[in-house]
Amino acid sequence: MALICVEIETGPNTTGSVIWMHGLGADAHDFESIVPMLDLCAPLRFVFPNAPMRPVTANGGMEMRAWYDIDPNAGLASGTADIQTSTEQITELIDLEVASGTPTKRIVLAGFSQGGVIALQLGLAIETRIAGIMALSTYVHDHEHLGDRVSFASVDVPIFMGHGMMDPMIPITRAVTSREALTKLNYQVEWHEYGMGHQVCPEEINHIADWLNRVLP
C-alpha cells in the first residue's frame, strides 16, 4: 500500500531529498513546521510520509498511526515484522525520488522516535549509499544483532543522533546503547544530547540544519 505523504520544497530545482518519518501516534504534518526554521544552503525536498493505522499493544490495542506495534512483553525484537514492512514502504518512496531525478546519494533518511527506528533500520541495510541518517529521540532496533544486517554501502554513512536527557518515553540510556552498537561497527555518529524530554528544541533544530548543510551541500 502506497504511503500518503506531505511534500515541501524549500526552493526551485531541488538538489536533494529528506524523507522524514514521524513518531507513534503523530502524522505527516508533525515536523512540517520545522522546515522553514532550517537555514539551508541548498534547495531541498522534504517528504513526510504518514504511517499506516494499526493497533498498538502498549496503548491497549488502540488504533493509531504507527510504523510498528510495541508489545512490552515481547522483548527487544518486538515489532520486527512490522518494521520490515515499513522499511519496504519507505524504500518505495526512495525509488520514487530516484525516478524523479534525485540520486540515492542525495537522499537523507530521517525520523523521530518510531520513525527514527525505521530510518536507522533501512539506512544501515540499504544496498546503495545514501547521504545520511538523522535519528532523533530514537534507538536501534534489536541492536544485539545489528552486525548481521548492515550493508557494505552504509559503512561510511553520516549519522546524526540527538536525544533529550529527560526523555520519559525512550530513556537516553537506550539511545546511548544504540550509539555504542554503531560505533563498535565503526560507524561515525554525530551525537547530541539536550536538556529536554521526548521532543525537539531550538538548539537541536540549529544542529539539524548544520548537519544537513554538510551532508547535502
Image (cartoon, rainbow, N blue to C red):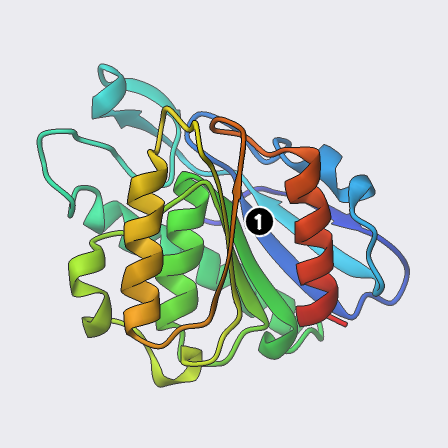
Left or right of 28 on screen, residue 82: left
Q: Amino acid at mark 1?
A: Trp
Total of numbered circles in the picture?
A: 1
Q: Nearer the viewer, residue 15 or 124?
A: 124
In the displayed structure, 171 sits above or below 92; it is above
Residue at position x 22%, y 57% from top? 143
Q: Does residue 8 appear in this view?
A: yes
Q: Position of residue 181 (x, y in %)?
A: 27, 62
Counting from the top left corner in percent of width and height, residue 34 is at 72, 38
Secondary structure beneath disc 1? strand
Residue receiving disc 1? 20
At 41% from the left and 80% from the top, the residue drawn is: 155
Figure quadrant of the C terminus: bottom right
Depicted 101 relative to depicted 7: above or below: below
Q: Which image quarter: residue 15?
A: bottom right
The residue carrying pointer 1 sits among few (fewer than 14), some (14 to 19) or many (20 or more) residues within 10 Å by Cα, namely many
Identify whether 214 is placed above or below 118: below
User: Which residue of the protein is positioned furthest toward the right in this rendering?
Assistant: 12
- Which quarter of the picture shows residue 142? bottom left
The residue at the point 9 percent across, 36 percent down is: 74
Is 11 in front, or is 203? 203
Quarter-wise, where is residue 31 in the image? top right
In the figure, is residue 51 to the left or right of 203? left
